[in-house]
């Protein structure tokens, strides 16, 4: 479970998050919606531990552990996964090699034995098939030459393989057509579990028709302005964010 | 109870350079310094025919009139050529008997074991034969063992120390020696021709494809000794051979000079692949000590449709200065150069290649990846020259530089000369650092800084790593990771 | 469209030009010009200046250009008469510098652009179109000294007859110049077996936070393209002319001065 208390975050001199509170219990899917510039991406990057974001006040714990004192990869090993809005390309590094290295790091941290290349390939082939990704794509360099939809599905594939306890999805629907959106949503829904929390960050309510959230929060001017159940999305769709300005 | 081990405790040496140990053996050296007498002594010691002594003396005379070149982007304190031994070899039990595997000083055998170099011919184990690699082990200036000689002889292949070839296959050596790199070619080539003591000789006769990888393993052990190997590889019509050169040296505070000369000749339809994994001692974190690696390597694609490929992974040496080159004389010949040069701490590298197109329809490919970290400096210097006779010449060059940290330097200096209108030459170069985005992406998936960098750097070098013979690929990748240790953060 | 153009017929050996307001200037080097000349040009902060150098006579000129903060200089050079030209150009912060050069005969040209102020931009675009025995030696260096500067160099050469071109293009990034974006592209079309092209595009980089690349291609007219045009009714000569024109057009079309384009047509 994720507990964020009074989080203040600045980029350089400018304060972006101004006292954000958020609590996502185990097994729940929460969505954070807000207009452009409200700090949605900042929230996801701060949780993942990206450099350049200053936490000036507040706390973040995952299952009781203080996340803010951990480095980026320590947080990943503690169970945080960020599905990025713009997944970067890593030329020359195959998807297979990348995932094997990452999964084995996660397994080592949990005290589990590492998988070898054959075991890894078998695991990946199965999971990839479920997401409509070809075996050939596993051999290609990470995100190189992937279409927008393929990149997002690749993020979900990684999520399925690494089995994190907190999945943060930063605008996973951007740039996707209906069919791609459905495949991605199916992949995400298949990963729902009692031991896993999900944070979906989105601008549009369309995604939330396919991944039904347990709770929706409106982020604007650096704070959560309002929270409600799934029906809040429709209200926002009809009236925009003006009411929460 | 204290924990003692036979090896010196790790903390005496830099953690990274695990080959930094030295071997305590009885060795024999000539007096220090370089003059005509030393040259004669060396020739006499090696029992050389007169033609070889003449070549040495001629080269020595040429060397005395030459000046050390100063155009490379490397700087080093002046070398005192008189303050070095030019011959140092492990003592043999019986002066005149040839060395067999059993004759070798057990401590030397142990050295090569530690280095992971197989000096014993591998047996078939439980019905599964590991890939065989024939090895010529050169300890200081002398070849101490060559494996698989008999088996190769059955194919007519000669693989032996060059000292042995000069006496046993004199005519053959005389035909090709110094034909690709003449003594007046450059300062270090002249020096090498005068004082070389050993190296590798490979001869593959017409139509023979060498059935196994050939490899030489050079180890500099004695103090203050320059290493001057001479390697000569000949592939006759239709022949093919793949050869790998590995090198390490113990850690010392002084710099040692390694000035080798490698000559390759490929006749019609022949194919020579020459790979180097160079891990000479690079000097310590403050830049003290380390090998000066000043090497002349050249391949002559003499015959029609001949092909010579150079693949190098240069991670060691305090200073690397080498341009493995191809002269594309035969029509339809092909030259290739694949290189990864890594510099860290205070290392300096000025390396690249020369592709000289003379025949018709020749083509060359250059892929050079350079990674600079710490306070090091890495320079790619290349020449692609198309003479008037080289109709339809083609070249494709890709040079990429990766800079790690704000104190290193990367230079790319390609010389592209075309004197022929029907030639197509393409060159591209880029310089950048490992992107923060890529590092963040990897770290967010649980990788440490080092793991992330290693993965990204390996991806960067992939095109070149693919060219390393399979038997050595894993070592090469490990070496790349090791060389960059300490460069993050 | 064009307001007053200040024409300066160079007749002295030394000039100090202070350009303190936006406008058009032409420097003409004609018959009777001194053989050795020194010219300093200062462009005041914020000005927008178009300056064209036209060479009809042989001479050696050493220039120093200072481009002030937030100023813009569009610089055209028509070298056609055995000139030896040396330029040191200093750019202050937020300035921009666009240079367009045409070489039609033997020239020895050295250009050093110093990006000394942050966020400045420089683009060097050159066309060498050589016949007979002409030879061009061009050494162009862009030296990134300050942060966040951008530079590009495009050098296109068409070599016929017995001509020769030596192009040395440098991108030098000094230790403090983080955020550098430097590009360089050199393309050569060889029309004769007696022509020679030597290119040395150099990168010297001492800061890791950079994006630098260079490319170099040397080739001849694409036979397939010639055939295609001929099959549409053009003569071989017309086809080749069209292709050569297309090759250099990219640079000429880029010139932001309609009147200059006339001069640059090859």
Image (spheres, rainbow, N blue to C red):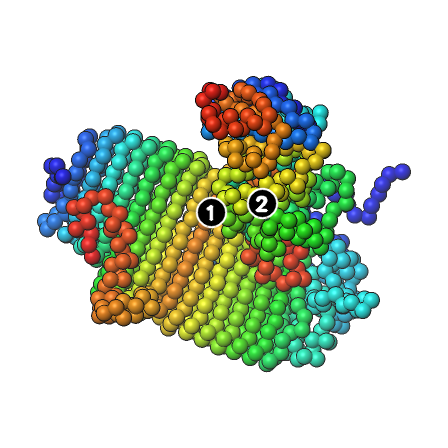
At 53% from the left and 20% from the top, the residue drawn is: A225
1 vs 2, front mark: 2
Task: Say left or right for B131 vs A38.
Answer: right
**Label pair 1/2, CB-CB below 8 angstroms:** no
At 30% from the left and 30% from the top, the residue drawn is: C69
- Counting from the top left corner in percent of width and height, residue C68 is at 28, 32
- Counting from the top left corner in percent of width and height, residue A189 is at 64, 39
Q: Which chain hosts label 2?
A: A
Screen quadrant of the N terminus of chain A: top right
- Find residue B277 and report its image quarter: bottom right
Q: Is residue B403 visible?
A: no
At 32% from the left and 59% from the top, the residue drawn is: C188
Viewer-nearest residue: B360 or C258: C258
Q: Across the whole image, how many numbered discs are drawn on residues?
A: 2
Q: CA distance from mark 1 to mark 2?
A: 39 Å
Viewer-nearest residue: A105 or A40: A40
- Counting from the top left corner in percent of width and height, residue B20 is at 69, 49
Residue positioned most to the right: B1
Q: Residues within 10 Å of mark 1 (few under 14, many from 20)?
A: many
Residue positioned most to the left: C32
At 26% from the left and 29% from the top, the residue drawn is: C45
Query: Which SS class for mark 1?
Result: strand
Query: Which SS class for mark 2?
Result: helix
- Find residue C226 and report its image quarter: bottom left
Question: Is A38 rendered above or below residue C184?
Answer: above
Q: Which mark is residue B85?
A: none
Q: Which chain hosts label 1?
A: B
Q: Which mark is residue A183?
A: 2
Question: Is A67 rendered above or below residue C2?
Answer: above
Q: Is residue C77 visible?
A: yes
Residue with the mark numbered 1: B431
- Counting from the top left corner in percent of width and height, residue B435 is at 52, 41
């Amino acid at each position: 479970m994720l507990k964020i208390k009074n989080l203040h975050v600045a980029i350089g001199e400018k304060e972006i998050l101004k006292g954000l509170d958020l609590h996502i219990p185990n097994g729940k899917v929460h969505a954070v919606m807000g207009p452009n510039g409200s700090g949605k991406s900042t929230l996801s990057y701060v949780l993942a531990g990206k450099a350049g974001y200053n936490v000036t006040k507040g706390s973040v714990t995952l299952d009781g552990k203080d996340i803010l004192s951990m480095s980026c990869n320590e947080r990943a090993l503690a169970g945080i996964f960020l599905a990025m809005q713009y997944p970067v390309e890593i030329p020359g590094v195959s998807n297979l090699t990348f995932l094997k290295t990452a999964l084995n790091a996660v397994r080592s941290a949990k005290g589990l034995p590492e998988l070898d290349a054959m075991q890894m390939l078998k695991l990946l082939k199965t999971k990839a098939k479920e997401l409509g990704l070809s075996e050939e794509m596993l051999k290609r360099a990470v995100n190189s030459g992937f279409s927008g939809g393929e990149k997002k599905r690749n993020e979900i594939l990684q999520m399925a393989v690494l089995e994190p306890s907190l999945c943060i999805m930063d605008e996973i629907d951007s740039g996707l057509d209906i069919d791609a959106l459905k495949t991605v949503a199916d992949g995400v829904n298949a990963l729902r579990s009692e031991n896993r929390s999900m944070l979906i960050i989105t601008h549009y309510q369309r995604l939330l028709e396919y991944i039904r959230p347990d709770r929706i929060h409106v982020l604007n001017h650096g704070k959560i302005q309002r929270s409600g159940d799934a029906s809040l999305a429709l209200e926002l769709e009809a009236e925009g964010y003006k009411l929460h300005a | 109870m204290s924990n003692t081990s036979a090896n010196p405790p790790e903390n005496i040496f830099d953690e990274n350079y695990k080959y930094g140990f030295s071997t305590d053996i009885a060795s024999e050296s000539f007096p220090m310094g370089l003059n005509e007498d030393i040259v004669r002594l060396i020739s006499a010691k090696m029992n050389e025919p007169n033609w070889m002594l003449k070549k040495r003396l001629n080269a020595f005379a040429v060397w005395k009139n030459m000046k050390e070149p100063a155009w490379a982007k490397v700087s080093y304190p002046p070398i005192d050529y008189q303050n070095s031994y030019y011959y140092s070899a492990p003592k043999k039990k019986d002066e005149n008997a040839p060395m067999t595997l059993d004759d070798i000083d057990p401590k030397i055998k142990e050295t090569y074991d530690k280095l992971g170099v197989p000096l014993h011919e591998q047996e078939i184990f439980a019905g599964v034969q590991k890939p065989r690699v024939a090895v010529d082990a050169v300890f200081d200036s002398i070849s101490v063992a060559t494996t698989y000689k008999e088996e190769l002889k059955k194919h007519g292949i000669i693989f032996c120390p060059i000292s042995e070839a000069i006496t046993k296959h004199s005519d053959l050596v005389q035909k090709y020696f110094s034909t690709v790199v003449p003594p007046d070619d450059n300062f270090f080539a002249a020096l090498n021709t005068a004082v070389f003591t050993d190296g590798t000789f490979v001869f593959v006769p017409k139509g023979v494809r060498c059935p196994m990888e050939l490899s030489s393993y050079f180890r500099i052990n004695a103090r203050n000794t320059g290493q001057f190997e001479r390697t000569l590889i000949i592939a006759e019509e239709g022949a093919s051979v793949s050869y790998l050169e590995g090198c390490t040296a113990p850690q010392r505070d002084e710099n040692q000079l390694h000035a080798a000369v490698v000559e390759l000749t490929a006749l019609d339809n022949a194919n020579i692949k020459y790979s180097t994994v160079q891990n000479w001692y690079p000097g310590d974190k403050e830049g003290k000590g380390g090998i000066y690696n000043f090497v002349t390597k050249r391949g002559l694609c003499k015959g029609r449709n001949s092909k010579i490929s150079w693949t190098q992974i240069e991670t060691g040496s305090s200073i690397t200065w080498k341009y493995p080159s191809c002269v594309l004389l035969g029509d339809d010949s092909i030259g290739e150069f694949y290189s990864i040069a890594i510099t860290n701490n205070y290392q300096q590298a000025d390396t690249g290649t020369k592709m000289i197109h003379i025949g018709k329809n020749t083509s060359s490919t250059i892929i050079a990846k350079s990674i600079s970290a710490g306070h090091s400096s890495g320079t790619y210097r290349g020449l692609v020259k198309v003479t008037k006779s080289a109709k339809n010449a083609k070249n494709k060059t890709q040079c990429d530089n990766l800079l790690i940290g704000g104190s290193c330097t990367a230079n790319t200096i390609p010389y592209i000369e075309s004197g022929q209108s029907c030639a197509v030459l393409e060159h591209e170069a880029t310089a950048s650092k490992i992107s923060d985005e890529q590092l963040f992406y990897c770290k967010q998936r649980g990788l440490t800084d080092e793991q992330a960098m290693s993965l990204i750097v390996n991806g960067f070098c992939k095109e070149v790593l693919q060219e390393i013979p399979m038997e050595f690929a894993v070592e090469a990748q490990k070496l790349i990771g090791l060389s960059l240790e300490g460069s993050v953060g | 469209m064009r307001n007053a153009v200040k024409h300066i017929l160079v007749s002295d050996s030394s000039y100090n030009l202070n350009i303190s307001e936006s406008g058009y200037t032409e420097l003409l080097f004609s018959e009777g010009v001194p053989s050795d000349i020194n010219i300093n040009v200062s462009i005041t902060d914020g000005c927008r200046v178009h300056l064209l150098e036209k060479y009809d006579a042989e001479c050696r000129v050493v220039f120093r250009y200072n481009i002030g903060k937030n100023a813009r200089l569009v610089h055209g050079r028509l070298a056609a008469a055995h000139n030896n030209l040396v330029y040191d150009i200093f750019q202050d912060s937020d300035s921009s510098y666009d240079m367009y050069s045409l070489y039609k005969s033997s020239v020895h040209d050295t250009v050093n652009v110093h990006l000394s102020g942050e966020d400045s931009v420089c683009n060097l675009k050159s066309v060498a179109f050589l016949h007979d025995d002409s030879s061009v030696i061009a050494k162009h260096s862009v030296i990134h000294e300050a942060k966040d500067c951008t530079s590009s160099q495009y050098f296109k050469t068409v070599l016929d007859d017995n001509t020769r071109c030596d192009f040395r293009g440098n991108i030098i990034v000094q230790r403090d110049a983080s955020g550098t974006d430097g590009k360089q592209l050199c393309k050569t079309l060889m029309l004769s077996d007696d022509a020679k092209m030597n290119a040395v595009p150099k990168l010297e980089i001492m800061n890791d936070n950079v994006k630098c690349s260079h490319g170099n291609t040397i080739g001849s007219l694409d036979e397939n393209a010639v055939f295609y045009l001929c099959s549409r009714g053009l003569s071989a000569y017309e086809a080749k002319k069209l292709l050569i024109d297309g090759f250099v057009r990219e640079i000429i079309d880029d010139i932001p001065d309609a009147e200059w384009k006339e001069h640059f047509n090859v």
